[in-house]
Amino acid sequence: MNKKVITELAQLFNSTGIYSKNRYIENNSPLQVFKTKFPNDSYSYEIDTFLKCQPDFHLGFGADLPWWGNRYFTSENGIRTMILSQDSRSPDGASVTFYMPLLKENKSLLELRNEINSNKSWDAFKSFEKIKNLFDRCKFNFDFVYVTDAQKMDKGWEELLEHEIQIVKPDIILCLGNKGLTYLMKKNNPKITKIVDSENTQLNIHSNALPKMLSKPILIASLFPSTGNGHYTDKRECNVVNTYLKVIKELQNSRAK
């Protein structure tokens, strides 16, 4: 574990209060359920390092915790992918810590849905099946995946996201939805449906975005795979998946030279 990087990441969010400890201390909170079910997962103790730097209490709106795989914050040579979702509006701000292990599971969708529904006080995550299908097709190496939301606050979220990306240094950013693209491309309306109609959904990060990164991540656009998103089609998902797999292969080949 690179404790220094996790601490730096934690300190970035300290003043916002969005990850205050009071949000995660209940025994039935998603984070505590995760830690009980997966005590040997590195995230179970690495997140404690993260939360130690957060205030004890905050009344404002919280955000979903970032999640990362077991080898993301190590010195191991791996292709690191940031999955950049939309925004945090779930009442249980650590739900991702419970759902990510399920998204990795090789179980039937019915079994996984029953496990989700057993926690009746949590967000039902209606789009779970669609997201799992996308993740399965992308063949993620979850050990090197970092998941976060683009908009964690109503104001100032762009600067917060910029610093977060510069700290975690992903090789690839898979952007689920418009929100992250508005900052990374410096466009108010990136016209994402037109982007994902192309067989290649890889984009260039704007020169004014991530100014402190000499080598910027590869950006791949995707619609958010929501049950309520009528624009999300299998053809568009295929374009995203094929683009991601092509980029992974290119990075692997370049590192093998």
Image (spheres, grey):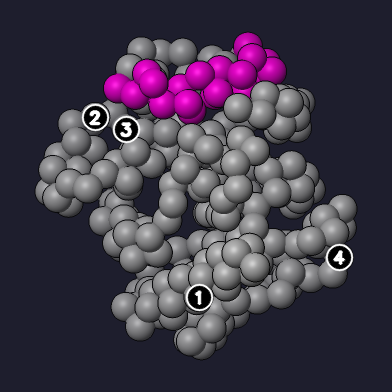
Q: Residue tagged by mark 2?
A: 119
> Which disc number belongs to residue 246?
1
The amino acid pointed to by label 1 is: Lys
First in sequence, mark 4 or 1: give its number.
4
Distance, label 2 to label 4, CA atoms, is 43 Å
Q: Are marks 2 and 4 in contact (CB under 8 Å)?
A: no
Q: Which of marks 1 and 2 is in front?
A: 1
Instruction: Classify mark 3: residues with Cα within 10 Å, few (<14), some (14-19) or many (20+).
Output: some
**In the depicted view, which residue is nearer to us: 32 or 4?**
4
In x, y percent, where is residue 109?
A: 17, 51
| Image quarter (top left, top right, bottom left or bottom right) of the N terminus | top right
Cα distance, mark 4 to mark 3?
39 Å
Q: From the viewer's perspective, tell me whether residue 145 is left or right of residue 216.
A: left
**Above or below 241: residue 21:** above
Mark 2 and mark 3 in contact (Cβ < 8 Å)? yes
Q: How far across and how far down the image is residue 181, in percent? A: 65, 66
Please report the bounds of the magenta region as a residue range.
Answer: 37-56
Q: How far apart in space, not on screen, are marks 4 and 1 (Cα)? A: 26 Å
Relative image position of residue 197 (x, y in whole percent): 48, 86
* Classed neighbour count for the residue bearing mark 4: other residues with Cα under 10 Å, few (<14), some (14–19), many (≥20): few
Q: Mark 3 points at which residue?
A: 122
